[in-house]
Amino acid sequence: MNILNTSFNTPYKTAPFSKIKTEDFLPAFKKAIENAKAEIDDITNNDETPTFQNTIEALDYSGEELDRISSIFFNLNSAETNDDIQKIAQEVSPLLSEFSNDITLNEDLFKRVKAVYDSKSELDLTTEQETLLDKKYKSFSRNGANLSEDKKQKLRAIDKELSQLKLKFGEHVLAETNKFEMLLTDEADLSGLPEGAKEAAKQLAESKEKDGWLITLDYPSYIPFMTYADNRELRERLSKAFGSKGFHNDNLDNQDVVLKIANLRFERAQLLGYKTHAHFVLEERMAETPEKVNEFLNELLDKAKPAAQEEFEKLEAFAKETDNIDQLQKWDSAYYSEKLKQKLFDLDDEKLKPYFKLENVINGAFTVANKLFGLQFEEIDDIDKYHDDVLTYKVTDSEGELVSIFYADFFPRSGKRNGAWMTSYKPQMIKNGINERPHVSIVCNFTKPTKSKPSLLTFNEVTTLFHEFGHALHGMLANTTYPSLSGTSVYWDFVELPSQVLENWCYEEESLKLFATHYETGEVIPMELVEKIKASSTFHEGMQTLRQLSFGLLDMSWHGVDPTKITDVKAHEVEAFGETKLYPEVEENCMSTAFSHIFQGGYSSGYYSYKWAEVLDADAFEYFKQEGIFNKTVADKFKTFVLSQGGTENPMDLYKKFRGQEPQPEALLRRAGLLK
């Protein structure tokens, strides 16, 4: 019997990682798809009149086994992959696309859904049930249920090809990241690098049986080198390697993949009656239309650009004065920004790191969650994990009731993609009167402990941990009936609110005192350092805003237009970046070919949502600040109307219930210091 196709007889029904063999996945997927199809057939062939319960609700609870296997498999493909898993992903993705299309293009099933939808005014539905009905109906109509048979077949073919192209894109980026190594044998080339970064580079070289210091494109290696290394030529080499992933006209090149994805998405949108892919996507977002998104991005651009240009000119003058640099290049950005920041604020990440030992920061996040939402975290060792590095916790409420199981995976490995993300292994739902609690995971890439030092985080890594933990709380505190509306299953431009708002606690003295203690002396972080962190938090905010806006505008330039005339990826990108450009163009670099958020992840036509969510989070945190950052009333409202509600209501309605008003963009501009 394949363990993946059974009910897990494990503590808290957790995934039995140690008993799952890679070769179990493909047959398990096939069997689960078969079982899910049988469930769909039962709903479709039901002789009874279609009702909300026997059609809409039944549909939402169907395919639970398949969803569980998918979440285990695709999470491993991100966090602990290998050639065999990647090969299975290529085989499985089209099967899942096909199955998904089998549902949305099933005419008899759609008739039943439509019958319930058309009679909704006569049904006595809760708000959550109304939302689910609307979502189920749209999942058919937005995926071709109203199309003619030949167009349905066309849609199936597009979806199958897209699922494979997205995987191929991601595999190329990961292979490019893993392929590049810069081995340094002369210690002089490490000049400027902090001791911890040097030691990590030495350890990395040793792990690969090489002499010297190894620098890679993984963030914990790449970012310190770009920030501190005095050798400008080596920074240039590393920067170009990072910026040219998927852009070498070789077997890992992504230019054709990008063009194909953009064109297939456009073709799909047109087939469904939408002007562009962005029009299709944004119909289900708070922003609603590409016009609104572009208006939002350009409004912020108008406010941020003068500040960004002024910051850039000051940085260029500083580089000229410091090292006689005539023309500031992209590989100079982090290096001189850090030097200028140190000069202006006397604040160096290396001075801060001793106060941010990883274990202390984790406990800090737990303490904040306890003070705000009454959660307790207990590390447990009786559940399986997919790698020794993974930490596992049982999360309970103030009554001692189980809230969630929580996995945390913090260090880079060769089988793990770059970046940081939150995900889940089991969703929350209420089924047969039982409130099934979720299994939530966060994955990061922080510097590993070395022989002489524990894992000490940069301040940026501290905010990253709090960010992902904010997503995790959204998953953990979910309290909805239906799985497809639970936790982070919300409009994409609302999903970043819980994560981004939690970052604010990293800047507050009252919060920092709880966990920012020196790893050797136990001394609480001095308050003048806290003041400097706050003062420096808006340093180069204009340039940072411009950078984020440039990514949002690039995304819209691929997805908010007819891309059929685009033949040159690089030329298109240069034009899209026109209004946001500060640094000279680097011929060898191309962002689109490694822009995983929009070509592999779920952010196509959605990258603007980071800034959109910043408006929400700045406005929300102003409310906390007014009443006290650990104010129970505000925290309870946030938990009740935002964290626990998932996607059960329109997010703007939920936000207004929490805040009492629509979010004000001025809150973000105030916080960023961009309001003159």
Image (cartoon, helix red, strand yellow):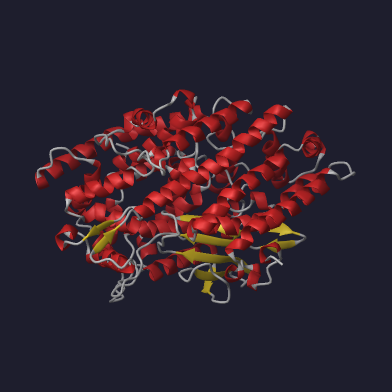
Q: Is residue 53 left or right of residue 261?
A: right
**Residue at (61, 50) in percent of width and height:** 92
Depth check, front residue: 210 or 258: 210
Depth check, front residue: 168 or 522: 168
Image quadrant assignment for residue 273: top right
Q: Is residue 371 left or right of residue 586?
A: right
Residue 552 visible from this viewpoint: yes
**Residue at (78, 51) in percent of width and height:** 39
Q: Residue furthest front?
A: 251
**Residue at (31, 43) in percent of width and height:** 541
Image quadrant assignment for residue 610: top left
**Does residue 146 lie above or below 285 as drawn?**
above
Q: Residue furthest top?
A: 565
Residue 293 visible from this viewpoint: no
Q: Is residue 188 left or right of residue 55?
A: left
Provide residue 140's location: percent of width, then percent of height. Answer: 70, 37
Provide residue 607's location: percent of width, then percent of height. Answer: 46, 40
Q: Is residue 550 left or right of residue 232?
A: right
Depth check, front residue: 653 or 301: 301
**Does residue 115 lie above or below 226 as drawn?**
above
Image quadrant assignment for residue 435: bottom right
**Residue at (64, 63) in percent of width and height:** 437
Provide residue 214's location: percent of width, then percent of height. Answer: 27, 61
Provide residue 324's location: percent of width, then percent of height. Answer: 9, 43
**Does residue 317 lie above or below 393 as drawn?**
above
